[in-house]
Image (cartoon, coloured by chain):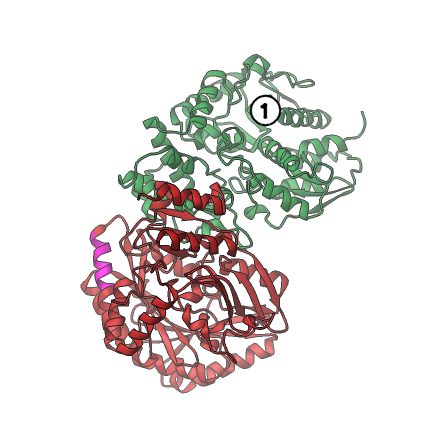
Amino acid sequence: MATTGTVYDALVAIVGKDFVSDRKEERYFYARDGGLMPPHEPDFVVLPRTREHVQEIVKLANREKVPVVPQGAGLALTGLVIPQRGGIVLDMKRMDSILEVNEKARYVIVEAGVTHGALKNHLQKHHPQLRHSIPDSPPTATIAANAVIHGQGRLSQQHGFNSDMVSGLEVVLPTGELCRIGSCSVSPYWFSKGPPLPDLSGLFLGWFGTTGIITRLGLKLYPCKKMRDVMLALTDRAELVPEIMLRLSHTELVEDVVAAAQPLPLRFRDTFWIMAYITGDTQEELEFKRKAVWDALWDLFESRDVGFLSLPPAMKGPLLSMPSKDTTRFADVSKGGGFQYAGPIAPIEKFPLFVSKLEEVATRHKLFYSSTSRLIGAGHCMMFSFSFSFNRANPDEMARAKTALDECSKFALEEGGVLWKADIDEQKLLMDKMDPNTLALMKKIRKLLDPNGIMNPGNWEIG
Amino acid sequence: MQDYASQIHRCFRCGYCKFPSDYSSFNCPSYRRFRFDSYSTGGRLWLVHAWLRGEIEWSEHLAEILYTCTTCKNCVEQCPMKFAPDIVEWIVGARSDMVEKGRIPQRVARFFEAVHGYGNPLKRLRSQRAAWADGAREYAPGDEYLLYIGCLGSYDENGQKMAGALVDVLNASGVSFGILAEEEECCGNEIYMLGEMGLFQSLVEQNVGRFRDLGVRQVITLCPHGYNTMKNHYPASGGDFQVYHYTQVLDDLIKKTGVKLSSAAARVTYHDPCFLGRYNNIYEQPRRILQGVPGIELVEMERNRKDAFCCGGGSGNFITDLLAGGEDSPARTRVREAHETGADILAVACPGCLTMLTDAVKAENLDDKLVVKDMSQILSAALPAR
């Protein structure tokens, strides 16, 4: 592009030569993620260290009309940080300071590049009585990016989406101003992202970086009990899974509820695993909760519709690990290094229908599948994953996986689900189905905040 | 070497490879230094895959990305996939392809030229290989051990002090040993890691042939790099001798002979060399030795044993310096971590680590607070007066 020299030099002047690249190798890597969306190269990859860096870069991008795409670890798998129109990819991971933990108000303030792994370690080491909601994505996933995509984690059954646990934001607006959102806009404390003020966090969460760049984030922390355990209920009746999940949630004693389905190993086929995670400060507390889980499903156990599997340590360890390496290992099931999932957020009553669709689509496209469904809120909805693994060295299999994912997404949407971290094609599906006035409001918001249309263009792009 | 080209696409770029097991910090030396994802293991594997598929052209920058990997094996420890044990071999395989095509960074090419022409990567004279060796005699048939010094021990100033100290300790322990002096050849570990398989094989054959001619049955190496290649690569080329790193031998000797060590009051933290620890699972012997010295208080750095952070010197980077300096260099990061323990001494068991970390202490202006010493130097100082 004609301005390359000028923009490059200006970027170097902002962050230093070591942290700007316009070289082919960085442009290649940052042009894609681990999923199946087509790549598109940025012109520059930049690693800011401070919010002032981010402000200066955004101002530069406005002057030059260059797109800006903020990125965490790029693990959404749906191409949300693929720079569809080139421009500047901002890799935020150098902004990696954990700034404050307020133990009494139970929140942490982090810079945008802090990873879930780093926060987990920090809390375990310095504040062992506190924890945060760790997603199943790898530990390099950043807190901010996970909130922006409305991720879920270990505490989502109790406290909702990880974005519901945000307690404040600092954002660089698309025009370069630094803006605080929530209680931190009027107070030194970051205890609320909105209430009792107008909740402006909704202008940034779920927008995939199209309305601003989060530079700091407050996150709610929760009590960390001394002990954790997982109980495993099994059933071969898909239609019972929603009922089981609801009953577990009804106890109000369960940390996390996850239902899994996969055809291999063969002992897993046609069986649904429902994992209930419990915590306690004492063995007595843990035992009390075990009994509550047992009691909740007792009649189903007696009727032989549900069984409990006593887990050996070799199985329990991986299930209790946070994050779960087993989730990542699914990418290499077919020795091919790839998996992607469509993860609609949907009522849990859809579980049997979605499982049936998943099996049918996988069979038709000759793909290996799995599904993990996590309860969100007290049964208000679930994230159901239609997951397919694929071999990166097999273009045909990759194409089949993409087709299968698209089919599942459309199906889920037709059944009342809402697509999670939707790729640009799925965003179009969502917007086609959306209330026109809602869509018009989104358009107004984008135009108002980002008059030059520089922020992650191609995403949430309303015609 | 494996057919890496048919496997390398299996990396999912999940990023586990960047961390230690507790996720406390980034533990991949080149990623920690440069912070572009292209310098992580996942970045490297995806770029090599792209190069193999013709999606990107070879470039000096691509080669530098590949060669800034220190082959420290942190990724092997942390990668959750079944192919994890093969990752370093994939990196080496890709380097080997670049070597065959003559497309490698200039500094790496100079490293090969030096070893090829001079028998060592420092371009020092063969006749000076034993200039350090006051008190060590040449190996003679019947000696229990051959003490293999290696290039850094022979020529590098810090390495020479380390070698001298080890000779003192072995002499004091009554061990029967000798060195090869000018007849010693480069072990080839770095040559292997850098992918020059022809030169590597030539070095192996020379060393194995010489050891055989001399009737060597047991080798003690000064350097973990030499230990690694002699233990793990030489057997395939007829190397049928026993090989020990000196810390293994000293751990044994101290236990058996009951050598009395004088008090050396100090707070010491130990840095695990990659080729001793992650490559060969030797973690406890050096710690036992330190704990056996009266007055030494051993304190651990946050990242230790399998999670130890590499000094940045592996894969010839102690010479090629592709990771460059700066405050984010692995060695400087590591000495800051050592300093945080409150230690007076940063103990190492590798001449490469000794030099890398000694330089880093100076760069961090910690000279009056932290001194880097090899285990052999600590032990030598603790020997009873003779």
Give the residue drawn at x 37%, y 31%: B96
Residue A400 forms part of the magenta stretch = yes
What's drawn in magenta, residue-wise? Answer: A396-405
Residue B376 forms part of the magenta stretch = no
What residue would you read off at disc 1? B149
Question: Which of A197 and B292 lies nearest the eye of the viewer?
Answer: A197
Q: Where residue A372 sits in the image (x, y, percent)?
A: 36, 69
**Residue B126 appears in which quarter of the rendering?**
top right
The C terminus of chain A, quarter of image: bottom left
Q: Where residue A118 sits in the image (x, y, percent)?
A: 53, 58
Q: Which SS does the magenta portion mostly show? A: helix
Tell me which chain appears green.
B
Give the residue drawn at x 51%, y 33%: B228
Q: Which residue sits furthest bottom?
A: A299
Q: Where residue A180 sits in the image (x, y, percent)?
A: 51, 67
Relative to residue A381, is residue A453 depicted above or below? above
Give the residue drawn at x 51%, y 23%: B121
